[in-house]
Every structure is written in C-alpha cells, then in structure tokens.
Amino acid sequence: MAKHWLLASLTFHVPQAFVVDRDGCIAFIGPPDSLEDVLVKVIDGSWRASAEAKNAEKERIAEGEIDAAKNALYGRIWAATKIEDWKTALSAIEEGVNLFPDDISWRQSHVGTLMGEMRDMEAGWIALGQFARTAIERNSEEWLLTAMQQLFYPYDYSGLLAERLSMGKELSERILRLYPQQGSRLRFHSYTMIAFYYHESGDNDRAVDLIEQALTFVDEEPLPDVKKQKLKAQLLSALAEYKGEQV
C-alpha cells in the first residue's frame, strides 16, 4: 500500500480513501470524510469528468508536491542529525525556512539547531530576531507565543541578557494587545509564559497579576475536571513561586 498506492499518488497522510470506478480507474483520492459527497457521483458516472473532480485532484497533487519536498528535506535533516553533522542539517533547515515561510516549525528548528546544537549564539540570536520580527509583522498569536517560548528556552543567554529582556518585553506587549480580542480559551497558556518573562525581569507584581488572570480563564473553560485541576495546580505553583511563598 505504501509503495504502490500512497507514494505512487503523492499521498503522505493517512487515513486516505481511494475510490475505483466501474472502469477500473482511480476516480478519487482524498480524505474519507469526503466520500459521502463523492461516492454517489462516482457511482452515477458524473464525477470523473467534472470540474469539481479535476480541481480536487489538482489541489491534492499541489499539496502532495509540497509534502514531497518537505519529506526530502526531513530525510536530509534526519540523516545529518543521526551523525551529528549539524552544518548539513542547518543547510537543509535553512532551505525549509526559505521554501516554506508560513510553516513555523522550520523557524523553531533553525533557532534550536543554531543555539541548542551548534552553540552559535551570535547566529542563533540573529535567527531568533528575524523570527520575532516576522511574528510581530504577522500579528499572529501562534507565532508571537512560539517566538516567546524560544526566547525563554534554556539556551545560554548569558551574554544577551539585556537584549533578551528587551525582546521579551516587546513580544509580551504585542501578545497582551492581541489577546483581549480573543475569548478566554487557552489564554492561560500565553499568560503563563508572559508571567514568566515578568518574573525573569524582576516585575513579580505583574507576574502575579497575570497568573491570577490565568486562573480565572481556567475556571471559565468547559474542560474536564481532571485537566482543569492539573492546570490550576501548575498555575498555583507558579503563583506561590512569584509571591516568594512555599510551593
């Protein structure tokens, strides 16, 4: 199946449905939840020559070609990582950054490889700065928060403390301006990260305020009780730390 159906059709995700029509031709390749609409048209013979079918196949192949290019890069990265050839891995990652500018995972890998594996803090800081600038330009909560997470990952920032806090301040303010436009759902994750920044910068009052707000967000969420209690326990632990109390 992998060789003669999935790879042969540029299909890299499962589950995937293949519909063979009365003539023995593959009439449709796509997600199984599309079958309710497609199967009736395949059976009555109206699907294969329709504009809908041609457009669906064109889009599927375009997505498959992107996945094939990504998989080729992943293969190079995996092989280089296995032998700790970080220069080769970095080259493939940088290709990914250029080829797939909307895919945040390449930016994460870029910063992580430079700072975490190669210990090149100078180049890593430049990459993280570009990541942060892009996140700000996009005004995307996902990009802003991910850049923030990279900023407080346990890399050796000892020579960049002032720059790190300055970038953290800008990212935090952007996230806080953005989030009031959103509902309470999942805001507690962002507030927890931003509170950590304020704690690191010495503003424990602000950190405490954000954790207390995050606790109210958890209370407002329709979450399973076990998950809600786990999140609240994590937040209460952080709250005690920022208040200087025993956890």
Image (cartoon, helix red, strand yellow):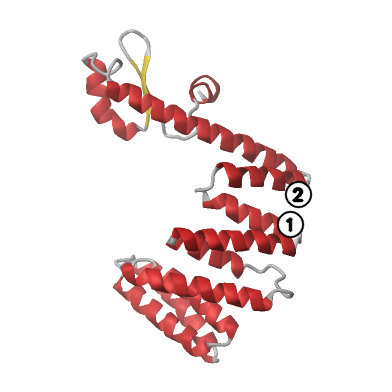
Q: Position of residue 152 (x, y in %)?
A: 60, 70
Residue found at x 43% / y 85%? 209
Discs 1, 2 touching: Cβ within 8 Å? yes
Q: Farthest residue toward the top?
A: 23
Relative height, residue 66 to residue 104 (above, below): above
Between 175 and 229, the one nearer to me in the picture: 175
* Image coords of residue 79 (percent x, y): 72, 40
Residue 91's disc number: none
Q: Residue 60: x, y in percent?
A: 41, 29
- 72 sits to left or right of 171: right
Residue 139 in picture, x, y percent from top left: 43, 62
Against 113, is 171 above or below?
below
Residue 136 visible in rendering:
yes
Q: Estimate the spatial distance between the alpha carbons at disc 1 and disc 2, rounded to whole Å.
A: 7 Å
Determine crowd level at label 2: few under 14, some 14-19, many 20+ residues with C-alpha closer than 10 A: some
> Is 75 located above or below residue 234 in the figure?
above
Asked where in the image residue 155 lies, by quadrant, the reply is bottom right
Q: What number is the disc on residue 86?
A: 2
Q: What residue is drawn where x is 39% and y is 68%?
A: 178
Asked whether 173 or 193 is in front, the reply is: 173
Picture residue at 50% right of the left edge, 48% below the top: 102
For the image shown, how many numbered marks are present on the structure? Answer: 2
Tell which of 105 and 39 is nearer to you.
Answer: 105
Place residue 241 in its image quadrant: bottom right
In the image, residue 45 sits, relative to residue 210, either above or below, namely above
- The residue to which callout 1 is attached is 117
Q: Earlier in the sequence, mark 1 or mark 2?
A: 2
Q: Is residue 193 among the parts visible in the rendering?
A: no
What is the three-letter code of the residue carrying label 2? Trp
